[in-house]
Amino acid sequence: MNLDRLVCYLAGGRPSGGAREYPGCRDRRRPARAVPVLLPGRLYFAFESRVWTGGMGFYDPMDPGEMPARAYLLTAGQFSDVAAQEMHRAPGPDLDLSGVLATGRARLGPGRYETLVCPGVLDGYPVLTFTAPWRSAEAELNAPSAAYLGHLSEGLAAAHGWSEARIAAYLGSRPGARTGRSAQ
């Protein structure tokens, strides 16, 4: 959601409030374009982040509702390198995107961000993201840290123009936001 946070994946660096230095992508250019989108499904918070402490944000495309997001126009190589960094791998070879493009979903491994999802197409480009292989109802929910919520809040305000009150209500209503099964 937050461009400054994405730039740490692209160009390398440590996001404010984060505990990890990212190596960056092979292609360090900023996205060619960024637009607000609404994805089918829902955001939830689960497990424990080594970067932020507290819960991590995941996308369950099968949950009811819509999830506000921000679509960035990246190259396939940039997407591959961002995904690799979230999978705690070094940027390197491009991912094989044929499975996710053909079926809308491809599991690359058992890890927390090793499932690719294509929830649609925007202006002729596939919308791709990565998330966990399990459903939100199966996850060990955990409230996120204030620093992590800050990045999400900044992204929601910049992408969707939401007020602080609307952002707080939205994020506070996501499953796991209060270390429980809220918003089921």
Image (spheres, rainbow, N blue to C red):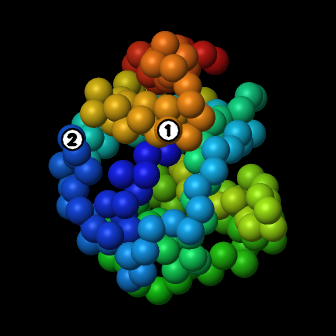
Residue 62 seen in the figure: no
Percent across and percent down for residue 56 are: 40, 39
| Distance between mark 2 and mark 1 Cα atoms | 19 Å
Label 1 environment density (alpha carbons within 10 Å; few <14, some 14–19, many ≥20)? some
Q: Is residue 14 above or below residue 155?
A: below
Choose top left, top right, bottom left or bottom right for residue 129: bottom right
> Which of label 2 and label 1 is nearer to you?
1
Tell me the residue at 38%/68% (across/down): 10
Q: Mark 2 — residue? A: 17
Q: Mark 1 — residue? A: 158
Mark 2: amino acid: Gly
Label 2 environment density (alpha carbons within 10 Å; few <14, some 14–19, many ≥20)? some
Tell me the residue at 69%/59% (across/down): 127
Percent across and percent down for residue 96 are: 62, 80
Q: Is residue 181 above or below residue 82?
A: above
Percent across and percent down for residue 61 are: 70, 43
Q: Nearer the viewer, residue 46 or 120?
A: 120
Q: Nearer the viewer, residue 99 or 168?
A: 168
Tell me the residue at 59%/35% (across/down): 160
Say what secondary structure mark 2 lies in. Answer: loop
Percent across and percent down for residue 89 are: 35, 72
Is 137 displayed left or right of 16 in the figure? right
Say what secondary structure mark 1 lies in. Answer: helix
Sequence-first disc among 2 and 1: 2
Mark 1: amino acid: Ala
